[in-house]
Image: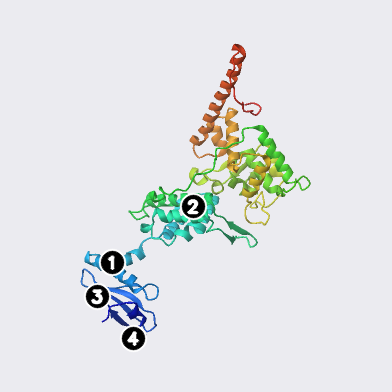
Amino acid sequence: MPKISKRTVDALTIPAKRQWLWDTELKGFGVALRPTGTHSFVFNYRDKHGSQRNITIGKVGTMTPDEARKRAELLRRDVMDGRSPIAEKRAAKQAMTVGELLDAYLSSERFKKKAASTQAVDRGRIERHLRPLLGKIVLEALTPRDIEAAHGKIVAGKTAMEAPSENKRGRILVKGGEGTARMAVRLLRAILSWGKAAKVLPVSVTPDLVAGVDIGRDGKRDLILDDPEAYARLWRVLDRLTNPDSLEDGEKLVRSEVADAIRVITLTGARKGEIIGLRWRHVDLKGGTLTLPLDAHKTGRKTGQERIIGLPALASAIIARQPAGCPDDLVFTPARGGDRLDLSKPWRIIRNAAGLPAGIGLHGLRHSLATQMAMNGAEAAEIMSALGHRDITTSQKYVHWARDKRQALAEKAAAGITAAITGSVVDTGKVVKLSEGQ
């Protein structure tokens, strides 16, 4: 029997029946020759029970004889240490993968209790980002480096694509970017935490895998509109961009449904998903309310309660002017029908045209309303009810902020009075203009 080398392998022929060629130097290392012409490097050994085992190292042509020899040497050391490569290989095949964990999560009560809009977002992040990049990795082999690599690929747009939606004429644009990558990794951490609590994860796997991964920071979500003039500019821009005759050079027309949805979010403090998913059966214009069932708002499954949103007169008028539809039809209809409105891109255009803070998102309009309520004396319980917070802690931060703001304004006012009385020069700073009644 010769030593297995490149020359030996190149000289192999196709046998009439299966044969083995064993190496003269490394016991157990050989080549399996098949009548099909597919030859493989193998390692043969006896396990601790004396049974003969044969493990395939790799196909001839996909690796060199030297590479196969090094792998065989490692396997031999494992056997000498009392390990069984075959048993470990079988265990690895049976081990849970990231993809199987994702499947378990999607079938879990935790997932089912989420609002329909949140389910759709989670499922999108799983199927379009996490599964393609991490799904085949065995959980026990998952490392922070794997997660970092996946995060980087999402940031770079490697998972971006355009896919058909449930609507025959609609398309879904899957984007990458830092925000998308950050939210995908956060979802993975949440799923790992759920898996640990549900005793689905292997004991050696913990959510701490994600802890050391640098996913960057969110934009400033605490930016708000605290100046009445900012609201006035927003309204003027919404009016201008929806009127073809009022557009300035380079501006594009914004659909009236998009502008009206943003107006209602501004006036009610509702979440974006609650408004773009609003259906006529949720609307009571006579009563001046929107009533969202458990599956139509973020905290419904957790609180077990419907969410009732009060409608100011102007918000009621905006909803009333939408084309009437059937009870299950969307109030704010998308251009193509079927899918919900996409407000993200139009909002950036509107925000820039109105000269609003660059980092303020649609959620900032919700923060803005809560802040205005607090500045006008609303208590935490009132803010909690109006905005649909799950617990009062979130609402209290607006009350605390308003209290600090009033104190700062009082200090500035007092400083100005002191200067007038004593004749000293005191820098009062810039007083923020508040809305009437604050």
Q: Nearer the viewer, residue 393 or 28?
A: 28
Label 1 and label 4: CA atoms lie apart by: 30 Å
Label at residue 17 = 4
For label 2, the residue is 184
Label at residue 25 = 3
Compared with 134, 238 (above or below) is above
Given the image, on which type of amino acid does mark 4 rest? Lys
Q: Residues within 10 Å of mark 1 (few under 14, many from 20)?
A: few
Given the image, on which type of amino acid does mark 2 rest? Ala
Label 1 and label 2: CA atoms lie apart by: 37 Å
Query: On the picture, is 152 further left or further right than 90?
Result: right
Tag 2 or tag 1, which sits nearer the N-term? 1
Label 2 and label 3: CA atoms lie apart by: 51 Å
For label 1, the residue is 74
Q: Residues within 10 Å of mark 3 (few under 14, many from 20)?
A: few
Q: Position of residue 386 (x, y in %)?
A: 58, 36
Residue lying at the far top of the rendered structure:
422
Compared with 104, 32 (above or below) is below
Q: Position of residue 211 (x, y in %)?
A: 41, 47
Label 3 residue SS:
loop
Compared with 326, 378 (above or below) is above
Residue at position x 54%, y 36% in the image: 384
Residue at position x 56%, y 48% in the image: 296
Given the image, on which type of amino acid does mark 3 rest? Glu
Tag 1 or tag 3, which sits nearer the N-term? 3
Pointers 1 and 4 in contact (C-beta within 8 Å): no
Q: Position of residue 320 (x, y in %)?
A: 71, 44
